[in-house]
Amino acid sequence: MVQYDRRVLNHLLDAYENSLLSTGENKRTIQIELRFTKTSIPSYFDESSNEYENIHVLMKLLESKKLIRIIWKDNKQDYVIWKVRLMTDHIEEAYQYAGRKPKRGLEEENITLLQKYLNVEAPITAAFAGYLLERLQNHKSVKEYIELEKRKETEEFLRACVLVEQNRKSCYIREFSIRHFQDSKYFERIESRIAKVFRQFSEEYAEMDTLELLAEYGIYRTPDYVYFKGDARISIGEGIIDLSLLKQGIGISGEDLSSIRFSDLSRIKKVITIENLTSFFRYWEEDSLFIYLGGYHNRIRRTFLKMVYETIPDAKYYHFGDIDAGGFSILLDLRKKTGIPFLSYHMDLDTLKRYMQYGKRLTESDQKRLRKIGKEKEFCEIIRFMLEKNIKLEQECIGETHAVRQTVNHC
């Protein structure tokens, strides 16, 4: 059964909270009203329903308690309700009747909570808390991120953000969840919200998907493998594997990486990181070591790259990725986080022109990101061309006949 008294009162209180009346900042008389229409109260106008009289009884009850004033159509008492008006001089009683707390009080409770997170050793969470705090102090909406009425839920969410930022032990998502929340599935319910916060409050993660982002903190859905291949040998315990005999390479889990050693890297003149798995499986050059990044590199892959670099610092290091904003961003991020002087590979203007027939149109987001990256002198020429021609190119479309074991010149 619909409680029309509470429903109408909540409509009026929502309107009151979204007005300047609730903050005391109004400079003119404001009336908080709800018009009765077929949209706002459809059952009131349903001739086949008996709700008409019930609604009258409930509205009169609210009026008797001085919570609302009924304004009748054409001033005909007990005929048709035109609209109802909130009696703001009895606003506290209205909140009590509706069984809800005033927004102002809820804001204060959440402000107190958020202030606790301003100085935590988790910079993204602190920035997020500061943003919410500033909005609440200026009586702005925070519905995009939290519900004021669910303060305990907000506190648990903020705690989860801090725990992710501070995590230093590699683990699976469900292990992380049960360790910190005593519920193996809880974290999966909020992981997309956490990723949204991290993307919006840290440029570093702006383009990462949820699993890539969590992997940065050592949290994985499944075992994290590093795939590599090339003219080299690795030793595992007493055994030696000649990678050059494995056309598609080998995958080693992050947990096991510390147990392998390169026993022969003497032939390696190039180390090439590859963004996409299809290209990794297809691509080959002599005297090279290939490492699959899987989009954005994570901590395990960076550790592996650093180990390779320490072993063969004189090799040339290249990154081969998509000719788009993401590919350029990954290259820049790779240099920054590994300290290795990576060069771009097949990500130049000549390659783009050669395979233009397979290009895709840029999105608005692509254009915005490219303009930002285009400030880097290294990419200004190709990005200018990409913007002029409205084009980007996926790595899988690039087929170099001299550099693949199977000739592929199409997507």
Image: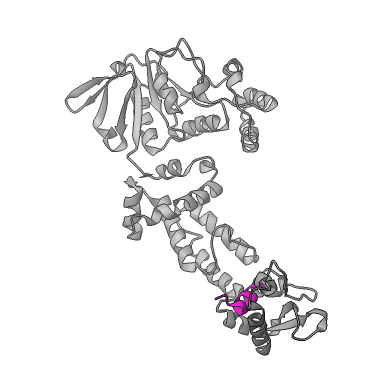
Picture layout, residue 356 above or below residue 206:
above
Give the farthest residue toward the top: 402
Q: In which quarter of the image is residue 82?
A: bottom right
Give the farthest residue toward the left: 238
Q: In which quarter of the image is residue 286?
A: top left
Please state the extent of the stretch shown in magenta in the rendering: 1-11
Q: Measured from the top left, where is residue 209 in percent x and y?
A: 48, 42
Picture layout, residue 340 above or below residue 122:
above
Q: Measured from the top left, where is residue 296 in percent x and y?
A: 46, 35
Give the farthest residue toward the bottom: 64
**Is residue 208 found left or right of 82 in the rendered image?**
left
Q: Main secondary structure of the magenta part?
A: helix
Residue 295 lies in the magenta-colored region: no
Of residues 9 and 241, the one drawn nearer to the viewer in this rendering: 9
Q: Measured from the top left, where is residue 175 in percent x and y?
A: 31, 51
Q: In which quarter of the image is residue 4?
A: bottom right
Residue at the image position 25 percent from the left and 29 percent from the top: 260
Residue 4 lies in the magenta-colored region: yes
Can residue 2 be seen here? The reply is: yes
Of residues 317 and 239, the one drawn nearer to the viewer in this rendering: 239
**Is residue 325 found left or right of 403 in the rendered image?**
right
The quarter of the image holding the N terminus is bottom right
Residue at the image position 55 percent from the left and 79 percent from the top: 99
**Is residue 149 found left or right of 240 in the rendered image?**
right
Of residues 53 and 2, the one drawn nearer to the viewer in this rendering: 53
